[in-house]
Amino acid sequence: AQTVTQSQPEMSVQEAETVTLSCTYDTSESDYYLFWYKQPPSRQMILVIRQEAYKQQNATENRFSVNFQKAAKSFSLKISDSQLGDAAMYFCAYSLPNFGNEKLTFGTGTRLTIIP
Amino acid sequence: EAEVAQSPRYKITEKSQAVAFWCDPISGHATLYWYRQILGQGPELLVQFQDESVVDDSQLPKDRFSAERLKGVDSTLKIQPAELGDSAMYLCASSLGARYTDTQYFGPGTRLTVL
């Protein structure tokens, strides 16, 4: 079974600084997808960024980028120029690209606090 | 912007009572998911629908939980009887379902407290 591990229950960063959230996963599959989801307090979970395992290039979305190390099974999220609105729980997640296996397997999350 | 709707947002019930949660996915989304998120943990899939058919309910406690999506649009998740350990956030998500890698969009969730 696939597992996702987030070893940092909480992180904090000064506004405008850069922070990196860690995620490792375990799978025997060669083709899969990895995601970072953001869950703000009392608001719905939204997708931040996604990475296809077959792509070597790291995904980027504006201030958000990932460092995908397939051999090490590591998938970290870097947030640049942190803003107050970035404060949230961040979940790393994994899924398989075939029908019936698209369910997301989540880590336990990292609570990110932005210090003004 | 279209969103996944869920109701109620909060539900408090006593153990052994029945509860039901409703989810209305984004219009046109064929795939619907129910996840359970226990405090301090990540969400875990309970059931997945493709249109009106169940694709995966392997983690659904079928002795007390049931889910349906009769017309392939909105969905209801029921617990009967509720137990103390069912206290959690119940999240509904939907995706287009046209490709296996379509983005899942989440609703605001229903927070259930069982007393």
Image: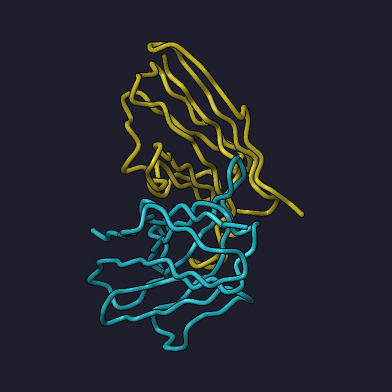
Q: Residue at x 42, y 56 (%)?
A: A104
In this view, A72 is above or below B19: below
Percent across and percent down for residue A73 are 29, 74
Percent across and percent down for residue B44 are 38, 46
Q: Is residue B47 left or right of residue B110?
A: left
Percent across and percent down for residue B92 are 54, 42
In this view, A23 is above or below A30: above
Q: Residue at x 29, y 66 (%)?
A: A25
Judged from this view, the residue extending furthest toward the right is B1
Q: Is residue B51 left or right of residue A69?
A: right
- Quadrant including the N terminus of chain A: bottom left
Q: How is the image coloured?
A: by chain
Of B106 and B115, nearer the camera is B115
Percent across and percent down for residue B80 are 41, 18
Judged from this view, the residue extending furthest toward the bottom is A56
How many numbered marks are there? 0
- Quadrant including the C terminus of chain A: bottom right
Of A28 and A109, nearer the camera is A109
In the picture, residue B54 is in which quadrant? top left
Q: Residue at x 59, y 54 (%)?
A: B105
Colour displayed for chain B in the image of the structure:
yellow
In this view, B40 is above or below A20: above
Q: Is residue A71 left or right of residue B88?
A: left
In this view, B37 is above or below B64: below
Q: Residue at x 43, y 32 (%)?
A: B88
Q: Which chain is cyan?
A: A
